[in-house]
Every structure is written in C-alpha cells, then in structure tokens.
Amino acid sequence: MNYYSSGGSKLKATAGEYQYLNDFIINQGIDFIWITDGKGWLTALNPLQETFNHNQYLLNLDMLRQGFLNKIL
C-alpha cells in the first residue's frame, strides 16, 4: 500500500512499475493487489487508468471502506 499526497513525474513511472510487478507476481501463480491513494494521482490520471485496466486488482482507500478487499479475498 502507498499514498501519494503530491504529484509529479514519478507517479507515471510508479504506475508502470506496478504493471510490471503485477505481471511478475501473477507469473509466479500468486494474485497481486495494489492499494494506492492520494491527491497526487490527480496529476497522473492516465497512467493510473492504464494500470487499473492492466492489473486485475487495484484498489484505493474508499474501495477498502466499501469492502472490495473482502470480496476479493
């Protein structure tokens, strides 16, 4: 889990790294759930959307409050 309170170019790279990490872990036969949140993502909506579409599980804090994690597990 991570939280980004500010934006920047790092978030685009971070989103791509989590796509790679997702693929690597899934290839090991393990499900991967990335939990991230923060206002910083407002500056990097496209990379976040791409990762949301790529990864099977990408959640934010509101989704946790709504019970999405329990539904996955």
Image: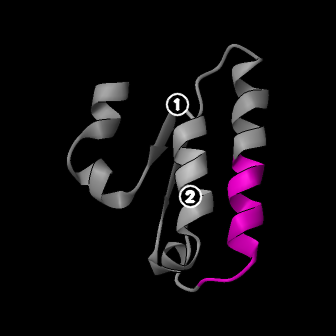
The residue carrying mark 1 is 56
Q: Quadrant of the N terminus?
A: bottom right
Q: Which residues are magenta?
A: 7-18
Principal secondary structure, stretch drawn in magenta = helix
Which residue lies at the image location 76% right of the left edge and 17% below the top edge? 28
Q: Are marks 1 and 2 in contact (CB under 8 Å)?
A: no
Tell which of 16 and 24 is nearer to you. Answer: 16
Residue 8 lies in the magenta-colored region: yes
Q: In the displayed structure, would residue 20 be above or below residue 46?
A: above
The three-letter amino acid code for the residue at tag 2 is: Leu
Is residue 47 shown to the viewer in this render?
Answer: yes
Residue 28 lies in the magenta-colored region: no
| Circle 1 SS class | loop
Within-10-Å neighbours for mark 1: few <14, some 14–19, many 20+? some
Is residue 1 shown to the viewer in this render?
Answer: no
Which residue lies at the image location 60% right of the left edge and 47% below the top edge? 51
Q: Earlier in the sequence, mark 1 or mark 2?
A: 2
Q: Horizontal and vertical percent for residue 32?
A: 59, 32
Instruction: Find the distance from the CA under tag 1 to the CA under tag 2.
Output: 13 Å
Q: Horizontal and vertical percent for residue 35?
A: 49, 51
- Tag shown at residue 48: 2
* Residue sitting at the far front: 46
- Tag shown at residue 28: none
Which residue lies at the image location 23% right of the left edge and 41% below the top edge? 67
